[in-house]
Image (spheres, rainbow, N blue to C red):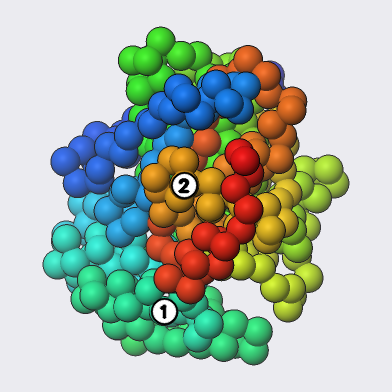
């Protein structure tokens, strides 16, 4: 088999894993709406469709990957009793909720500067939260020690086949819902940190719409994917840079996700904090959605590309809505981009 055929076969197998994840998650994850805004689209000059993962269980897409991973793990090992994860918040909540659903003990390692709403929600799903200092301690080492003590399964935030496949169910739903609207997507964009969501979405969408352009969206200072794609190898971000996008601060693309990015993405768009805040206020005022900073990155990228998208069908994944009230107020004070 030629190398190109082998690569195609590998991606076909991963796309099949996404379909298997959809079956596994049926009746557990929410089929979130693909929202159409004809009046807003007319003003923008292109058709804007929003995949509202803000309405997913736990308020973000992360439940999909966590749920698929834990369901598969429990099926493989009925004796599984405990899980541990490390996360700034949305993966934490996804793992905590999935563990509660399956009767598993969950311990989540979270940075001390994580948004208070995410810490509170994680505890609300019954998980034990262990806080660490983001810039001084190794969260993965802390998680491994807990896993050894509790004989727990470590559930990574993005670099795992079941996580990628679970997140890919967002893309499957986009394809089905766009077809129901009679729309063929020209471009699909989703926020990116370690890259599990955009990898899974690309696997699902490119199988059905090979001509669609798939873009990641990253915050300025955390543009590791854009730089890695240009270099042809995984590059890390420099530590200590600030961003309001707490959900998009992975060090570098995942070892499993990056090959998918290389072969299926058209690229990555980088957005500033101010662009993210403008996207948040746009979502509040016009889409009637509360979207957290990281969850707004793809929308921010699209608003920044507005002049390049005339007449196209654009699908944006708003990936999470777990914003602190203070951040929502900060966004609400921004100028309306449609005025």
Tell me which label, 2 or 1, sits earlier in the chain: 1
Determine whether, in the image, residue 19 is placed left or right of residue 103. Answer: right
Quadrant in which the N terminus is drawn: top right
Of residues 199 and 174, the one drawn nearer to the viewer in this rendering: 174
Residue 149: percent from left, percent from top: 34, 87
Judging by the rendered image, the residue that carries numbered circle 1 is 116
Picture quarter with the C terminus: top right
Label 1 SS: helix
Pointer 1: residues within 10 angstroms few (<14), some, or many (20+)?
A: some
Q: Position of residue 335 (x, y in %)?
A: 63, 53
Tell which tag, 2 or 1, sits nearer the viewer: 2
Percent of width and height locating residue 321: 41, 56
**Label 2 belongs to which residue?**
285
At which x and y percent is residue 148? 38, 82
Say what secondary structure mark 2 lies in: helix
Relative horizontal placement of residue 252, taking residue 40 as reference (left or right): right
Confirm whether residue 18 shows in the render.
Answer: no
Note whether 317 is above or below 146 in the view shown: above
Q: Whole-Å distance between the Cαs marked 2 and 1?
A: 24 Å
Q: Is residue 165 above or below residue 121?
A: above
Q: Nearer the viewer, residue 180 or 231?
A: 180
Residue at 28% across, 68% down: 96
Viewer-proximal residue among 129 and 180: 180
Q: Residue at x 41, y 27 (%)?
A: 36
Q: Are marks 2 and 1 in contact (CB under 8 Å)?
A: no
Which numbered tag is attached to residue 89?
none
């Amino acid at each position: 088999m030629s190398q190109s055929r082998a690569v195609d076969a590998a991606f076909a197998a991963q796309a099949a894993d996404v379909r298997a994840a959809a079956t596994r998650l049926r009746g557990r994850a929410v089929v979130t709406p693909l929202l159409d805004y004809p009046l807003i689209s007319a003003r923008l000059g292109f058709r804007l469709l929003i995949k509202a993962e803000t309405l997913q269980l736990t308020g973000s897409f992360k439940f999909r990957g966590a749920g698929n991973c834990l369901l598969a793990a429990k099926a493989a090992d009925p004796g599984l009793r405990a899980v541990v994860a490390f996360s700034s918040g949305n993966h934490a909540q996804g793992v905590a909720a999935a563990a509660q659903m399956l009767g598993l003990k969950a311990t989540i390692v979270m940075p001390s500067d994580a948004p208070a709403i995410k810490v509170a929600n994680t505890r609300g799903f019954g998980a034990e939260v262990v806080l660490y200092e983001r810039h001084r301690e190794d969260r993965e080492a802390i998680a491994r020690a807990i896993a050894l003590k509790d004989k727990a399964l470590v559930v990574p935030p993005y670099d795992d086949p079941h996580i990628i496949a679970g997140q890919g169910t967002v893309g499957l739903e986009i394809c089905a819902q766009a077809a129901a609207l009679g729309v063929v997507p020209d471009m699909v964009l989703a926020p990116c940190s370690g890259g599990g969501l955009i990898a899974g979405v690309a696997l699902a969408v490119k199988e059905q719409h090979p001509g669609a352009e798939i873009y990641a969206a990253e915050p300025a200072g955390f543009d590791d994917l854009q730089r890695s794609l240009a270099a042809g190898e995984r590059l890390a971000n420099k530590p200590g840079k600030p961003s309001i996008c707490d959900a998009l601060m992975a060090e570098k693309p995942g070892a499993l996700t990056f090959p998918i990015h290389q072969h299926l993405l058209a690229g990555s768009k980088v957005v500033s904090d101010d662009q993210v805040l403008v996207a948040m206020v746009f979502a509040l005022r016009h889409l009637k959605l509360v979207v957290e900073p990281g969850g707004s990155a793809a929308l921010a990228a699209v608003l920044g590309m507005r002049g390049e998208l005339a007449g196209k069908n654009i699908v944006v994944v708003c990936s999470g809505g777990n914003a602190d009230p203070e951040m929502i107020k900060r966004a609400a004070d921004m100028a309306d981009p449609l005025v």
